[in-house]
Amino acid sequence: MLCLVVLAVSISVLSPSLAMARESRYGSIITDAETGQVVSAVNPDRRSYPASLTKMMTLYLLFDELAAGRLKLDSALPVSRHASAQAPSKLGLAPGEHIKVEDLVLALVTKSANDAAVVAAEAIGGTEPNFATLMTAKARALGMNGTTYRNASGLPNTGQVSTPRDQATLARALIRHHTHYYRYFATREFQWRGQVIASHNRLMLNYPGADGIKTGYIAASGFNLAASAVRDGRRLIGVVFGGDTAAWRDRRMAQLLDSGFARGNGGTGAEMASAVEDEQPEAAPVRASVKTGGGKTKLLKQAALKAPTARPAAAEDADMVAWAIQVGAFSGFKPAHHAAAGAAKRLGGLGARASIDVDEAKAGRHTVYRARLIGFTEDQARAACRKLAKSKRECHVVMPSA
């Protein structure tokens, strides 16, 4: 019994510090790819380590060489001893062999191969340090004033730092300046010496409309992600720094993109700016009680994409914006997520501050996924259901206690 008490005390002491650790390095930004306007942001200028998001700049400079004709996709580049000696993730290239530029590109966007990054760096800059100087110069030219590069891969280096805003700027530049080559970021897998190498980018594989661009992780940075997705002809770019896990990072990005698309294209620059800082890091998963087929109440862990409640206005009490609407229950996570995102879009401004919540529940031996939008006042929730009902869409108001 004493051990249990000690354990409970230890957890209560450690949990706040773990939460602070996440908050201290968390940053995010969502921008409109066409206009560059900021849709939402939290700590967008906080410097941290970009990890393998670094390879976005490595690829940018490689695409510059291709566009200028100084390299071709079938150009064979030599592998040095320095490149071969890079830490994983890597292709396992041996000193003295050659690799084609197109294979380098595919290895960088799927496997995030560090040896491939150095091969590209040495082919363009002569040495990796020289290439890092070129990377930093290009960053300044693009307006990335909070970024400094020290290597081509993103492997740990205390002098290599960037910000979510800068990485969003780089992603936008890749899309706009190298449209022809940007398609490589959508690669799901490629063949390398008879081996199928699959993409590390799980969000791109699962989020509707996503077509790139790069994941990153080192212990000092946490889990980073730059992403881009298109919905109804509108492209958003998102960057998340400092996730505790890859799954948390991906869920967070999906939430931010959903919220960004739900806001739509309307609004002036001033209105868009008012959205900055209104997103907060996701809280730890909570448990919700649901009725099972036998009528008993069972505690279930909240499903992925548990979204944060929008910050209430000054005149509102937190409980007032805890109302939700449910727009369907489904046998799979994806259709539930799709239904909730579709409802948010249909609601327009009424749903702009709501967040998607896909709630997993057991019904007998079956699992159902309840598609919900949360963060309404009672009046807003009822108005939302009335609006959806006019379009013959299912909708039920969910009280805070539910």
Image (cartoon, rainbow, N blue to C red):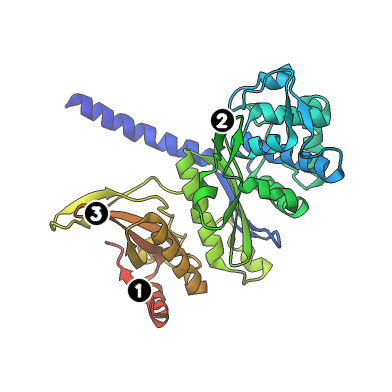
The residue labelled by disc 1 is 394
Where 375 sits versus 163, above or below? below
Find numbered disc 2 in the image and state the secondary structure of the residue it sits on.
Answer: loop
Q: Kindly indicate the quadrant of the structure image that contains residue 274.
A: bottom right
Is residue 49 visible in the rendered image? The answer is no
N-terminal of the pair, mark 2 or mark 1, is 2
Quadrant into which the N terminus falls? top left
Residue at 64% in and 57% down = 31
SS state under label 3: strand
Mark whose residue sits in front, 1 or 3: 3
Of all residues, the one furthest to the bottom in this rendering is 390
Per the model, the C-alpha gap separating discs 3 and 2 is: 41 Å
Q: Quadrant of residue 373?
A: bottom left
Q: Mark number for residue 220?
A: 2
Residue 57 visible in the current orientation = yes
What residue is at 83 percent from the left and 26 percent from the top? 126
Q: Position of residue 233 (x, y in %)?
A: 63, 66
Q: Are marks 2 and 1 in contact (CB under 8 Å)?
A: no
Q: Which residue is mark 3?
A: 366
Please state which amino acid type lies under the numbered disc 2: Ala
Tag in front: 3 or 2: 3
Q: Amino acid at mark 3?
A: His
Taking depth in this image into account, of 55 and 249 the one nearest to the observer is 55
Q: Secondary structure at mark 1?
A: loop
Which amino acid type corresponds to the residue marked 1 in the rendered image? Glu
Q: Nearer the viewer, residue 169 or 335?
A: 335
